[in-house]
Image (spheres, grey):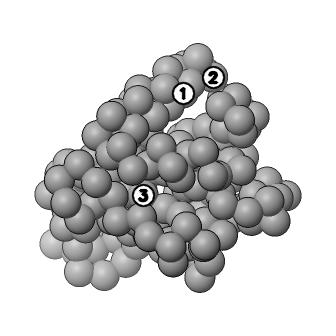
């Protein structure tokens, strides 16, 4: 005889929320869908935050992750797909995954971009089987309406991250613990 305990019920809900985070709308529609979302993200980013044009021109490569979906109930996860562009041309496709544990409940979606400011940082990213955001990552944050907090310290970092477009019920979005893996769309 099966009986559902409160613990089993909560684990089931948490697992469902985590799996729901993986269905972020991109699915199996291939490279054309990812590229279209990356184009829209790039246009939104540069129209909304004009200061990012300088980063774009200085970067040796840019990873656009147009839609990351995150959900959690004690145990959580995030997933999204995007494209790496060098000189404005898509060269590879990547997924971003993240698992979280702790006091959390809710769901959110956001976009993020990684600007690779040095050739060695880009090469390390492309050579790795699964690159994780680490100590060489610096955040540029929105500090005044339509501008990003890009300064000399940020520009000298090997990798600059922008997180934007958050919508949902979980406060904050960071990239710590996010693993990026090359995929075939």
Circle nearer the viewer, 3 or 1: 3
Q: In which quarter of the image is the N terminus?
A: bottom left
- Tell me where residue 179 sits by quadrant: bottom right
Residue 150 percent location from the top left of the image: 42, 64
In this rendered view, identify the residue nearer to me: 156 or 78.
156
Mark 3 and mark 1: Cα distance apart in space: 19 Å
Are the residues tagged 1 and 2 within 8 Å (C-beta)? Answer: yes
In this rendered view, identify the residue nearer to me: 55 or 133.
55
Q: Residue at x 59, y 82 (%)?
A: 135
Circle nearer the viewer, 3 or 2: 3
Mark 1 and mark 2: Cα distance apart in space: 5 Å
Residue placed under numbered mark 1 in the picture: 34
Q: Which residue is drawn at 28% across and 40% down?
A: 48
How busy is the neighbourhood of tag 1: few (under 14 within 10 Å), some, or many (20 plus)? Answer: many
Are the residues tagged 3 and 1 within 8 Å (C-beta)? Answer: no
Label 3 SS: strand
Residue placed under numbered mark 2 in the picture: 31
- Tell me where residue 156 sits by quadrant: bottom right
Q: Which residue is drawn at 60% across and 45% down?
A: 57
Classify 154 as above or below 72. below
Sequence-wise, which precedes: disc 3 or disc 2?
A: 2
Q: Residue 88 carries which label?
A: none
Classify 183 as above or below 150. above
Relative side of 148 to 81, left or right = left
Relative side of 60 to 106, left or right = right
Q: Which mark is residue 162?
A: 3
Mark 3 and mark 2: Cα distance apart in space: 23 Å
Label 2 SS: helix
Residue 61 percent location from the top left of the image: 68, 48
How busy is the neighbourhood of tag 3: few (under 14 within 10 Å), some, or many (20 plus)? Answer: many
Sequence-wise, which precedes: disc 3 or disc 1?
A: 1
Relative side of 179 to 5, left or right = right
């Amino acid at each position: 005889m099966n009986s559902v305990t409160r613990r089993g019920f909560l684990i089931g809900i948490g697992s469902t929320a985590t799996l729901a985070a993986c269905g972020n709308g991109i699915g199996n529609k291939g490279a054309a869908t990812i590229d279209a979302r990356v184009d829209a993200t790039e246009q939104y980013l540069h129209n909304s935050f004009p200061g990012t044009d300088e980063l774009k021109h200085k970067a040796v490569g840019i990873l656009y992750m147009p839609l990351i979906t995150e959900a959690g109930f004690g145990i959580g996860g995030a997933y999204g797909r995007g494209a790496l562009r060098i000189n404005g041309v898509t060269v590879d496709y990547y997924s971003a995954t993240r698992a979280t544990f702790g006091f959390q409940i809710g769901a959110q979606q956001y976009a993020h971009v990684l600007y690779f400011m040095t050739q060695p940082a880009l090469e390390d990213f492309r050579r790795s089987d699964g690159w994780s955001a680490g100590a060489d990552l610096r955040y540029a944050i929105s500090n005044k309406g339509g501008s990003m907090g890009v300064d000399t310290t940020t520009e000298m970092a090997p990798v600059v991250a922008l997180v934007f477009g958050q919508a949902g019920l979980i406060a904050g979005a960071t990239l710590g613990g996010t693993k990026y893996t090359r995929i075939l769309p």
